[in-house]
Image (tube, rainbow, N blue to C red):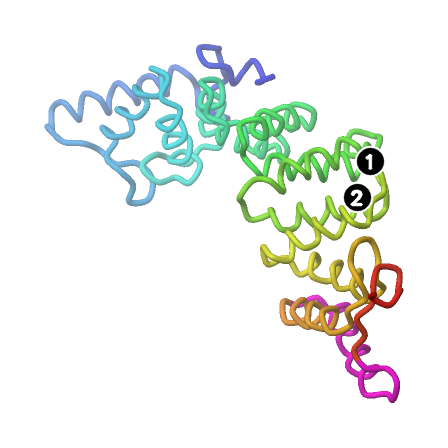
Amino acid sequence: MIPSSLRPGGRHPCDPGVGCRALAFVAALLAALVVAGGCSTRGGKGGAPVDALEALSADCRKGDGKACLKVATAHYQGRGAAQSFGRAARWFARACSVGEPEGCFHLANMLELGQGVKKDLAAAMKQYDAACKGKVGPGCFRLGKYWFEGGGGARDFARSAAYFKRSCDLSHKYQALSCFFVGQAFASGQGVPRSLSQAGRYFKRSCDLGGRKGCTGLAALYEKGLGEFPVDLAMARKLYSRACHMGQLAACEGAKKLRALGKKPGHGVRSEGPGGRPKP
């Protein structure tokens, strides 16, 4: 639920330190100057003309969510408008209310941080949920972490895994990490039935997306021959090395260990079935 002070059409306090009457007077004065001078004023740091911002604001009020986002971003960044986190939050709230999930996500961030609005973690999670339902991946990811860490007071691994699954299916910067967390849930049986085969599939997806943790998890399955993955030390070493090059220190140790093992007599590269059984 969007806080009442941020709802479209709802009353909201003026910015701290500036009276509402004073703001109205300044706005009227600026409007008069624009008409008299026949030109546009600019706000913020080298942003768009105020006319453009007003046009976007009008489009937003008519239900254009993308326009709402642009107005909110202008106020948030101070480009094309004076920087004001309070105003930014109100425009993000309007974007969310007209069905623009990116607005819900940015509003959630501000509610979580107490940026321009009163800090409200419960309200933030509701907005992240709205963003997630609108297929904004980072919103799903944040909820996955929230329930895994027990931000609401109690950890809920089933909810966490469900949100990480949604996040894994969406393209965004946390996608690979989300897939790894789903794999980790299946490997441990936290929130989902334990399945090393399912864990490996999600580790592989994470690795294919460039996730170093996913490559490390998959390497461990090949090293031990777990789930549906046969013992394959060559593949394990390759995956450990890949993860090592991406900065996973534990993977560097794994690759080093397998290199040393491969040099010992009788410890060459093995290719066995699941559980260490020789392939037929």
Please give the residue where the numbered disc 1 appears in the rendered image. Answer: 191
Residue 95 located left or right of residue 153: left
Residue at image coords 22%, 33%: 41
Q: Callout 2 environment at 10 Å: few (<14), some (14 to 19), or many (20+)?
A: many
Q: Position of residue 275 (x, y in %)?
A: 88, 60
Indicate the quadrant where residue 56 lies.
Answer: top left
Residue 25 located left or right of residue 198: left
Q: Is residue 248 visible to us here?
A: yes
Of the pair 60 and 249, the residue shown nearer to us: 249
Looking at the rendered image, the quarter that the C terminus falls into is bottom right
Above or below 27: residue 199: below
Above or below 108: residue 220: below
Per the model, the C-alpha gap separating discs 2 and 1 is 7 Å
Residue at image coords 54%, 45%: 172
The answer to which of marks 2 and 1 sits earlier in the sequence is 2
Name the dominant secondary structure of the magenta segment: helix
Above or below 30: residue 164: below
Of the pair 103 and 87, the residue shown nearer to us: 103
Q: Callout 1 environment at 10 Å: few (<14), some (14 to 19), or many (20+)?
A: some
Above or below 28: residue 261: below
Q: Which residues are magenta?
A: 247-268
Residue situated furthest front in the rendering: 280
Tell whether label 1 touches label 2 (CB within 8 Å).
yes
Please give the residue where the numbered disc 2 appears in the rendered image. Answer: 185
Q: Position of residue 162 (x, y in %)?
A: 71, 33
Residue 258 on the magenta span: yes
